[in-house]
Image (cartoon, rainbow, N blue to C red):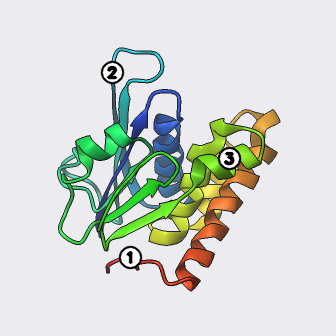
Amino acid sequence: MRQEVRLAGFGGQGIILSGYVLGKAAALYDGKHAILTQSYGPEARGGACAAELIISDSPIDYPMVSRPDFLVCMSQEAFRKYGSDIAEGAVLIVDSDLVQTTGRNWLRDVPATRFAESLGARIVANIVMLGFFGAVTGVVSRQALEEAIRTTVRPKTVELNMKAFAMGFEHAATVTAGGQAGVKA
């Protein structure tokens, strides 16, 4: 099973870190194959950026994402740029605080920025989103993602990041129970 994932937003949101954590979780802790590529504008913060991953049960012969099965957008610009460049039946996940969409029955949304702010650190919105992504898609196990976060972030931020991850993961269960548009198989 080969799955293509694109995480997109703007510089400073931790998009590249999220891609790194997701790939690490898949490769080191779930025993899968993973490749990460990244792109970003010349700006240190605020410019467009994307982390693209291929996660597979078998060796990966072509390392580029062409039409992602999963797209996570954490900015309106990312949605405009990548919102239509996805595979048939793909899952789109957006930060509902930062991305406005209409009429998409394959959409999942989470107020990641608002949740992060409730924890006192807007900077962990990417980890909230990673928790939500993990719960909604099942691409990588919860245990693998948690271990990848623990071994990647600075030791003094582990507790905050784990709270952010749990908040996103648990929100997915409430959204599913509430009847939001389901993930296509």
Residue 138 appears in view: no
Residue at (35% x, 29% y) in the render: 48
User: Label 2's element?
Assistant: loop
* Of the pair 111 and 127, the residue shown nearer to us: 111
What is the crowding at mark 3: few (fewer than 14 residues within 10 Å), some, or many (at least 20)?
many
User: Label 1's element?
Assistant: loop
**Up-down relation of residue 77 to residue 182 (above or below):** above
Q: How far apart are marks 1 and 3 (CA)?
A: 24 Å
Q: Which of marks 1 and 2 is nearer the N terminus?
A: 2
Q: What amino acid is labelled 2 in the image?
A: Gly
* Of the pair 25 and 174, the residue shown nearer to us: 174
Residue 113 point in image, percent of width and height: 60, 46
Q: Earlier in the sequence, mark 1 or mark 3?
A: 3
**Up-down relation of residue 149 to residue 4 (above or below):** above
Write down the residue under mark 3.
116
User: Label 3's element?
Assistant: helix
Residue at (47% x, 38% y) in the render: 15
What is the crowding at mark 2: few (fewer than 14 residues within 10 Å), some, or many (at least 20)?
few
- Contact (CB < 8 A) between labels 1 and 2? no
Residue 183, disc: 1
Residue at (68% x, 43% y) in the render: 151
Residue at (38% x, 55% y) in the render: 33
Q: What amino acid is labelled 1 in the image?
A: Val
Residue 35 appears in view: yes
Q: In which quarter of the image is the C terminus?
A: bottom left
Write down the residue under mark 2.
41
Q: Earlier in the sequence, mark 2 or mark 3?
A: 2
Residue 178 point in image, percent of width and height: 56, 82
- Contact (CB < 8 A) between labels 1 and 3? no
- Contact (CB < 8 A) between labels 2 and 3? no
